[in-house]
Structures are given as C-alpha cells and as structure tokens.
Image: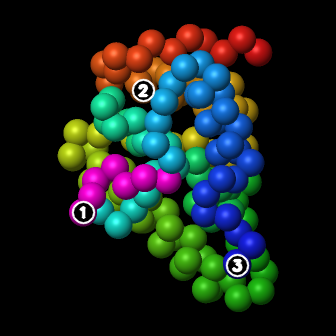
Amino acid sequence: MRSNRSRDTKPELQLRSLLHKHGLRYRVSAKPLPHLRRTADVVFTKARVAVFVDGCYWHGCPEHGSIPATNRDFWSRKIEGNIRRDRETDRLLTEAGWTVVRVWEHTPPGEGFEVVRQALEQAGSQQSPSSPSQ
C-alpha cells in the first residue's frame, strides 16, 4: 500500500505536462474548499475547476476495475466506499459552484486535456488554452 502514490502518478504527470505546455497554470494536490478534507489533483482556483485523475483500481473503473479474489468482501467494500466518496465530493464541490472534471488513468492525455480545456471554457476562465498539437 505504501508504494501506491496519491499524487504525481504517471497519468497525472502527463496531463499536467500538457496543461502546462498549453500555458495553463494551476495548483497541484490542493483543496478546492478549505473546510473539505479532500484534495483534487489539479485545481484552477480562479475558474473554480477541480480535476481528479482517478485510478482504475481504486475508483472502480467500469472498464478496467477489478476486485481481487483474496479478501474479496473487504476490497469490494473499500472500492464501493471510494466511489461513494467520489460522488459526495462531486456533489459538494458542485453545490459550492465548482466544476468537477474526472479523468480515468487510462484516458489518453490529449483527451484528458480536451475535457479540462472545455471545462475551463465553460467555467468562463480568462485563460484561453489552445488545442493540443499531437
């Protein structure tokens, strides 16, 4: 468990690299709301956009998520709890006026960038990112 990173994962670094390459500036592993004990992977404070890069295993990806055969009940409850917490986080942030973007770890970085760019555009961000040139 100790070797599982909570930040700076490969998919997160790839997405952040693309965002930075296109002139976007953001906060990393920050709390969107000071009273909420949850951190987003990438936070655009002015635009009020919180980005989460979710791991397929830990967040129950419908395509790639799986439950280990050993201690199946424990892991099933654990992952279901993570999914509930994610939904609650989305609800709380949305109620507070934030836009929440969730990107699966298996999503190609260019697609993740596009989703974030669109969210920033819709949030009325004053930053104007360009499309990736991949």
The residue at the point 29 percent across, 62 percent down is 36
Give the magenta part as a residue range: 29-35
The residue at the point 47 percent across, 36 percent down is 26
Q: Look at the image and say whether residue 57 sits in the magenta stretch.
A: no
Q: Residues within 10 Å of mark 3 (few under 14, many from 20)?
A: few
The residue at the point 32 percent across, 24 percent down is 123
C-alpha gap between disc 2 and disc 3: 33 Å
* Circle 1: element type: loop
Residue 125 vs 40, above or below: the answer is above
Q: Which residue is mark 1?
A: 35
Q: In the figure, residue 22 lies in which quadrant?
A: top right
Among the two numbered marks 2 and 3 on one chain, the one whose residue lies closer to the N terminus: 3
What is the three-letter code of the residue carrying label 1? His
Q: Relative to the observer, which residue lies in front, 83 or 14?
A: 14
Q: Position of residue 126 (x, y in %)?
A: 34, 16
C-alpha gap between disc 3 and disc 1: 27 Å
C-alpha gap between disc 1 and disc 2: 24 Å
Q: Relative to the observer, which residue lies in front, 119 or 27?
A: 27
Q: Which residue is mark 2?
A: 119
Q: Which residue is mark 3?
A: 1
What is the three-letter code of the residue carrying label 2? Ala
